[in-house]
């Protein structure tokens, strides 16, 4: 089972971006591979911390994680796919500000941390996509696996995403010598200052294309379709958005994929309606049934349930079926089903029915005698939300 990201970095949910970054630096220094050579356990903790930081350092991803936990990210590489899905090159290249010469280069004498931070980027990242998925009440209550077809940019099969006509059409960039970076030395009153920036000729890729692929025209991607399976956690609500990592558009010339954003829509139920974690049902009974009592079947999210309406039940009475509501996304909390009783009053009666009702109406037993213990409508509404 995956550990909580906040626990991994040793911070609380209210931690600021700066506190999260400082906590990550501390954990990363502790388990850095150069300080723990050959220690596989330390390497896994190093990757685990990197995965946690990747999510918590991004405001959007952090918000998704706070609402859905690990279920916010689909299976595969990156968040949701396990720490093993990130290799060292991924980590050092993604977090250059963390693993630059200012931290690991000086500490380890310009070793592996500083050099890996300078690894070349491939192409440009693909854009995110957004889709809507409708879920019925049962799917929301139990969770569901949805398979959809997404129209998107996919890698070009002709050039395998490189954008080049053939292998001979790719050459080392003449401006940066293949490093993807250019260095400039400037003279200042403090002496010579060296700056490093992304090569403008190859955009940091280290190579240039002399002859483009005829199928994708050098982009390394074409418009196509992909079948994606999305595991929806139980308890989601209308308007919530999930992020599936790496299932958006393919990037240009081997660039990383964008993400797929999934917006939740609820299909209305024929008999039930949702109230937070609770489910509400309007039960209509006749006047004789309210007087004598009755056993009835009511619909629930997962089938039918029998309940007893005791004799003398008043209109407006609310019965509660414990645990028959929706689960919360990130806790063991579960809602109830609330059954609101309505005593049906006929709008038209026959002459014979009128005569019977008039005789009953003159009886003292049929006159309203509310007890002090009877709760008002506002008290009942207040209790529902407590």
Image (spheres, rainbow, N blue to C red):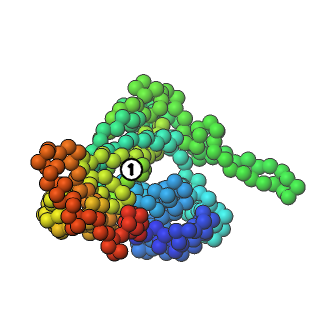
Q: Residue furthest left?
A: 352
**Residue for point 17% across, 64% down:** 291
**Front residue of this view, candidates 76 and 276:** 276
Looking at the image, residue 379 sits to the left or right of residue 188; the answer is left
Q: Residue furthest right?
A: 189
Label 1: state its secondary structure: loop
Q: Residue furthest top?
A: 214
Residue 9 visible, this angle: yes
How many callouts does the rendering have?
1
Count neighbours of disc 1 (C-alpha within 10 A) and say few if under 14, some if 14 to 19, many if 20 or more: few
Give the image location of residue 247, x and y in percent.
Answer: 39, 45
Quarter of the picture containing the N terminus is: bottom left
Give the image location of residue 386, x and y in percent.
Answer: 41, 69
**Residue for point 21% across, 48% down:** 346
Q: Is residue 3 above or below residue 205?
A: below
According to the image, label 1 marks what residue? 238
Looking at the image, residue 107 sits to the left or right of residue 136; the answer is right
**Residue for point 42% across, 24% down:** 214
Looking at the image, residue 231 sits to the left or right of residue 23; the answer is left
Give the image location of residue 263, x and y in percent.
Answer: 40, 46
Task: State the image quarter where residue 160 is shown.
Answer: top left
Q: Is residue 123 above or below residue 95?
A: above
**Residue for point 63% across, 65% down:** 18
Q: Is residue 368 above or below residue 206?
A: below
**Front residue of this view, candidates 286 and 117:** 286
**Front residue of this view, candidates 324 and 238:** 324
**Front residue of this view, candidates 92 and 342:** 342
């Amino acid at each position: 089972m995956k550990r909580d990201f906040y626990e991994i970095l040793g911070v609380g949910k209210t931690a600021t971006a700066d506190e999260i970054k400082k906590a990550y630096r501390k954990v990363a220094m502790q388990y850095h591979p150069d300080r723990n050579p050959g220690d596989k356990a330390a390497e896994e903790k190093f990757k685990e911390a990197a995965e946690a930081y990747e999510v918590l350092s991004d405001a959007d991803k952090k918000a998704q994680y706070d609402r859905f936990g690990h279920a916010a990210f689909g299976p595969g590489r990156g968040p949701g796919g396990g720490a093993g899905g990130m290799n060292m090159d991924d980590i050092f290249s993604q977090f250059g500000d963390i693993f630059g010469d200012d931290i690991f280069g000086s500490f380890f004498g310009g070793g592996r941390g500083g050099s890996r931070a300078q690894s070349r980027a491939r192409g440009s990242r693909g854009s995110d996509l957004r889709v809507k998925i409708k879920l019925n009440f049962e799917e929301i209550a139990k969770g569901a696996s949805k398979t959809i077809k997404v129209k998107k940019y996919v890698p070009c099969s002709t050039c395998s995403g490189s954008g080049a006509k053939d292998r001979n059409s790719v050459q080392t960039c003449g401006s940066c010598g293949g490093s993807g970076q250019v260095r400039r030395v400037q003279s200042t009153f403090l002496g010579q200052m060296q700056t490093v920036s992304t090569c403008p000729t190859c955009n940091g890729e280290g190579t240039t294309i002399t002859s483009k692929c005829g199928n994708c025209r050098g982009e390394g991607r074409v418009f196509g379709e992909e079948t994606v399976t999305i595991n929806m956690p139980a308890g989601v609500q209308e308007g919530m958005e999930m992020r599936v990592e790496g299932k958006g558009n393919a990037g240009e010339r081997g660039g990383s994929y964008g993400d797929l954003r999934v917006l939740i829509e609820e299909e209305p139920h024929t008999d039930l309606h949702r109230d937070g974690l609770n489910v509400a049902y309007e039960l209509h009974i006749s006047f004789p049934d309210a007087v004598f009592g009755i056993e009835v079947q009511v619909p629930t999210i997962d089938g039918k349930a029998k309940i007893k309406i005791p004799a003398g039940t008043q209109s407006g009475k609310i019965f509660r079926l414990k645990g028959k509501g929706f689960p919360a996304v990130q806790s063991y909390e579960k809602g109830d089903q609330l059954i609101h009783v309505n005593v049906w009053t006929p709008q038209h009666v026959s002459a014979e029915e009128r005569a019977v009702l008039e005789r009953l109406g003159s009886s003292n037993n049929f006159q309203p005698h509310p007890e002090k213990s009877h709760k008002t409508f506002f008290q009942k509404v207040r209790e529902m939300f407590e």
